[in-house]
Amino acid sequence: MTARLLDGRELASRLRRELSARVDRMPDSPRLAIVRDGSSDAASLYAASLERAAAGIGLMSESIVGPGEGYDELIGALNADPSVAGIVVAQPFADVAAGRRLVELIDPMKDVDGATPTNAGRLARGEPAFVPATALAVIATIEAFGIPVAGQRVVVVGRSAVVGRPVASLLLARDATVVICHRATRHVARETRRAEVLVVAAGSPKLIGPEMVNPSAVVIDCGINALDGRVVGDVDFEAVSPVVRAITPVPGGIGPVTPMMVLRQTVESAERMAAPA
């Protein structure tokens, strides 16, 4: 059996066209502000990827290297600026606590990466406004490719605040039966073999092998890891793809869809701001 390939590049291209059309209908071009401290290559790469994606739909964006001691004032100014529809704080910051505190200062209605405690609380209550982009990319992929989740047993491997926990909440809202596995879970393979949909976001390269899945499973791999000069997922794609029903590749699966979710939420924010009171 050859697994159905859930192609994130194809989905991202479709989303790009849809979002571009929505931006074209706006009388004014909204802005996405990406704040970073300049200390992290990962944060710089993330900011650059968001800027490229924004340009692809005609959305204005800017990557702002913060002014040292003036970050609080910067976030306050962006919150108050009516031309700014979305704010992202690109992590990590050199001062981790300062980076987290800045996120807490973002207006929740401009928090287009779903990072603020307010939006996390709304999601936990089943009343989401904006949610973390990677978790939303998982849901967008499931919906775009017609993967049923209502009544299905979904196993999520990983419990991070940006993927595992929010994706579990989003799946529960879609009537899935959700099990979360983590590093303290005993007999992880026993749980993953029972999954009808398996979402892996553990940050561990090739953690999931063919002996850990069942042949009817749909596998969603959120991992991005550098291994032997290549980018690989948390799932051993070459070994698992001949075994399962459908799978996302790495690269080319959830990765291309994730920045589109930031942009989608930015467009939604802009549309809300432009709506008559």
Image (spheres, rainbow, N blue to C red):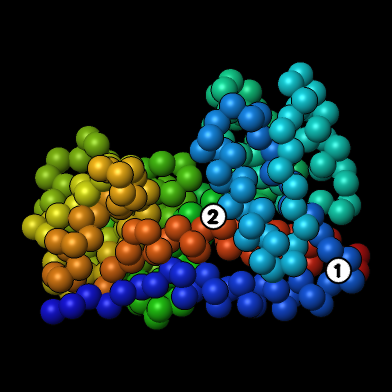
Q: Is residue 238 left or right of residue 175?
A: left
Q: Is residue 98 left or right of residue 147?
A: right
Q: Which residue is mark 2?
A: 133
Q: Nearer the viewer, residue 230 or 225?
A: 230
Q: Quadrant of residue 260?
A: bottom right
Secondary structure, mark 2, is helix
- Disc 2 marks which amino acid? Ala
Q: Where is residue 267 drawn, in percent x and y?
A: 72, 64
Q: Where is residue 269 drawn, in percent x and y?
A: 74, 60
Please tell me which residue is depicted at 66% across the width and 66% down the height of the picture.
56
Please tell me which residue is depicted at 88% across the width and 66% down the height of the picture.
28
- The answer, for residue 172, to whether it is visible in the render is no
- Disc 1 marks which amino acid? Ala
Q: Quadrant of residue 261?
A: bottom right
Q: Where is residue 20 drawn, in percent x and y?
A: 70, 73
Q: CA distance from mark 1 to mark 2?
A: 24 Å
- The answer, for residue 28, to whether it is visible in the render is yes
Please tell me which residue is depicted at 67% across the width and 72% down the height of the picture.
19
In this view, which residue lies farthest toward the front? 229
* Circle 2 Cα neighbour tier, 10 Å, few/some/many (<14 / 14–19 / ≥20): many
Which quadrant, please, contains the N terminus? Answer: bottom left
Q: Which residue is mark 1?
A: 275
